[in-house]
Amino acid sequence: MGLTETLLAHADVLAAGLGARDALRLEAGLCLYGHELEQDIGPVEAGLAWLIPRDRRVGTDRPFPGHEHVMQTIGPKANGAGKLPPRKRVGFLKPKGAPAREEAAVFDAEGNNVGNVTSGAYSPCLKSAIGMALVERKAAKKGVTQLFAENRRGKMEPLELAPMPFLECSYYKPE
């Protein structure tokens, strides 16, 4: 018997697909490589600079792959010379209709293209479509900027910026 069959033989285990994975990771505000992180989207733009230990940021003799690029965009708090990247990862709710899908263009109220959706799914817990987008920093101000996602038929649908994680998370941390 294979691993999958062994696991599914247990009464408390059910099979789940990528849709369930996406809903769970989006509710938790977690990035997925190839969506919120990729070759041209670094940890600072993705909102993950906090994962780089302080001792690896400044005056380190242990550089990591991409260290020079990350240090240029880590922000002024780290080394005084950095600058914030022009884009920022944001979370959004889409109260009506289907979820905004990956690569959907995001526009501001004036019709300017300010970014794109990186992930979107329906949240069974929130009973709403949710997602993440990479947008220009100026368009990432909750309560200030009204954003819209263009659906596959070219219609603009409103998005509400929302803080991440969308749901309170309690992760297991081994001791």
Image (cartoon, rainbow, N blue to C red):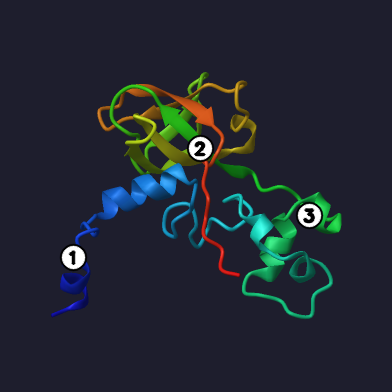
- Quick one: SS at disc 1? helix
Say which of marks 2 and 3 sits in front. 2
Return the mark for residue 128. Answer: none
Coordinates of residue 73 in the picture (x, y in percent): 71, 55
Q: Which residue is mark 2?
A: 91
Picture residue at 74% right of the left edge, 79% below the top: 62
Label 2, label 1: how far apart the Cα atoms are:
34 Å
Q: Hey, which residue is sitting farthest left in the picture? A: 1
Q: Is residue 139 above or below residue 18?
A: above
Count of residue discs: 3
Q: Is residue 130 left or right of residue 142?
A: left
Question: Along the polypeptide, which appears first: circle 1 or circle 3?
Answer: 1
Dot 2 and dot 3 residues touching (CB under 8 Å): no
Q: Which residue is mark 3?
A: 82
Which quadrant does the C terminus fall into? bottom right
Q: Is residue 136 left or right of residue 8?
A: right
Q: Is residue 22 left or right of residue 165?
A: left
Q: Quadrant of residue 127?
A: top left
Q: Mark 1 is on which residue type?
A: Leu
Q: Which residue is mark 1?
A: 8
Q: Quadrant of residue 41?
A: bottom right
Label 1, label 3: how far apart the Cα atoms are:
50 Å
Picture residue at 47% right of the left edge, 33% below the top: 92
Picture residue at 35% right of the left edge, 34% below the top: 100
Question: Along the polypeptide, which appears first: circle 2 or circle 3?
Answer: 3
Q: Is residue 45 above or below residue 124?
A: below
Picture residue at 44% right of the left edge, 60% below the top: 33
Q: Nearer the viewer, residue 124 or 70?
A: 124
